[in-house]
Amino acid sequence: MSTIMRTLRNLRRIGIKDYAHQMQYMGDTKAGTYIASDRYGNKYYENLADELPLDVEAVQSVKKTPSL
């Protein structure tokens, strides 16, 4: 869980729609520069300025239902 100041700063950076999506699926807010996406649709972001050294990458996963 992040601090209230970091949460409000990220809300201002990413907007209300992405904020609600991140809180629903990740339980935390992340902001950063888009780096890449993989073949499954996961998006990778990086934030070197505001995050701790061990928490610089964020992955926004795409949830898909398994096909039977």
Image (cartoon, helix red, strand yellow):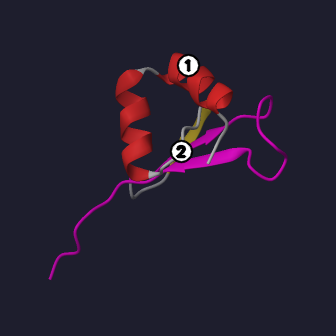
Q: Is residue 30 above or below residue 68?
A: above
Q: Is residue 32 visible?
A: no
- Residue 60 included in the magenta stretch of the image: yes
Q: Which residues are magenta?
A: 41-68
- Outermost residue, bottom side: 68
The amino acid type found where label 1 is placed reads: Arg
Residue 39 is a magenta residue: no
Specify whether 21 is left or right of 47. left
Give me the residue at 54% from left, 50% from top: 59
* Residue 26 on image: x %, y %: 47, 51
**Secondary structure of residue under mark 2:** loop
Q: Is residue 65 left or right of residue 7?
A: left
Q: Nearer the viewer, residue 21 or 5?
A: 5
The amino acid type of the residue labelled 2 equals Asp
Q: Position of residue 13 (x, y in %)?
A: 55, 19
Residue position marked by numbered label 1 in the rendering: 13
The residue under label 2 is 28
In front: label 2 or label 1: 2
Q: Earlier in the sequence, mark 2 or mark 1?
A: 1
Image coordinates of residue 30 in percent, x first then y, are 58, 37
The Cα–Cα distance between marks 2 and 1, rounded to whole angstroms, is: 14 Å
Q: Is residue 1 visible?
A: yes
From the viewer's perspective, is residue 53 above or below residue 35?
below
Specify the quadrant of the image occupied by residue 40. bottom left
Is 26 left or right of 54, judged from the image as shown?
Answer: left
